[in-house]
Amino acid sequence: MKLNAFKIFVYSLILGLFSFGAMAAGKLNLYNWADYTPDELIKKFEAETGIQVIVDTYDSNETLLAKLQASGGSSGYDLAVPSQHFVEIMIKEGLLEKVSGIKNMPNYKYVAEQFQGPSFDPNQEYSTPYQMGSASFAYRADSYSGTGSSMMEFFKPSSEICGKLAVFKSPEEVVNMAHLALGSSFCSEDPNEMQAVMDLLVEQKKCVAVYSSEGINDRLKSGEVIMHAHWDGYSQVGKWEGVDDLTYAYPKEGVVGWFDSLVMPKGAKNIEEAKTFMNFLMNPENMAILSNFAAYANAIPESVNYLTEDMKNAKNIQVPDGIPVVFGKACNKKAQSLIDKVWTKTMQ
């Protein structure tokens, strides 16, 4: 009996150690854009590492920035996915942790050379690549007689679009799209140029049904709107989901480019788990899972070997020859103040 009791004790101890080992694998709190994190990718990561991933979402870079600014280093998130100019802002404001050894991560070798050491993180101390794409507008071609050849089709909509138009809920890309339409510069410090931007947005508002950065494809599919501020990849997802005539516009004035990255917010608790995910995503097969889901381009050339035929032939993300892609940038205080004033007036 004593021997049996001893065996039971040993077995219980072993089971306890296995349970502890599973818990010791850790967890990861990821803060990401809505509709930007495929379940397949998360399940694969969890299966390979034993790390539990908890995903929370936001609708704009501004929302993410405000969250990190207000948290005082206690946001509770281990990774977030800002665009290039917001990475720069967050670095300057001390909102990010330095991540040691990014260049030595096993999968960093797969990152295309032109995307290593980007201008917003030249020493690759804070970020690893996520996805890249552009912002413009998309429309239901079967319900619209225009061609999307000018950004003014969005800002000065025709009678068939007026009342059936939707715009992003944040100024970041909308103001830059207005600059493209007017031929002025991003981050302009010229009050006259910003007055022209404001006039354009206020006039456009008369035709806007809703300001929203979420539920875009649902809104277009239902016919609630015919034209919507949109992103190239997400519009392609809309086509895949049955909105066959959903067309992403590449106006002659250009589109707003962006490059999203994984970063570690200040105060992150699960540092090694976050670094594990960064390295995991730079694997070509894993990055392809992300592109096949979200339909955006990426910085891992070898991921093409794992892309679906649908992704390889995705028309909405193919930039026509001669169309400028102008990347957003971090504005100084004077320029940002003018942007804030323009948006506040527009939203009144």
Image: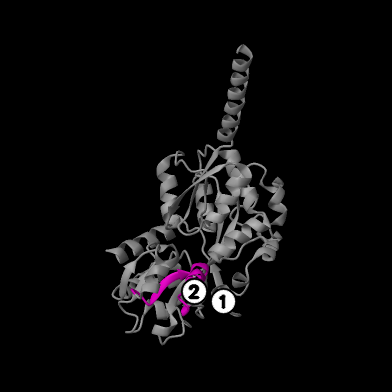
Disc 2 residue type (three-letter): Lys
Which one is nearer the viewer's eye here, 213 or 255? 213
In this view, the residue farthest toward the left is 348
Query: In the image, residue 311 lies at what x, y percent?
Result: 60, 70
- The residue located at (56%, 75%) in the rendering is 324
Disc 1 residue type (three-letter): Lys
Which one is nearer the viewer's eye here, 107 or 308? 308
Can the viewer see residue 126 in this picture?
no
**Residues tagged 2 and 1 counted as in contact (Cβ below 8 A):** yes
**Which residues, given as a range, are shown in magenta?**
224-246
Query: In the image, residue 172 lies at what x, y percent?
Result: 44, 62
Q: Which mark is residue 315?
A: 1
Q: Which mark is residue 239?
A: 2
- The residue located at (67%, 66%) in the rendering is 304
- The residue located at (45%, 57%) in the rendering is 34
User: Which secondary structure, mark 2?
Assistant: helix
Q: Quadrant of the N terminus?
A: top right
Query: In the image, residue 139 lies at what x, y percent?
Result: 43, 78
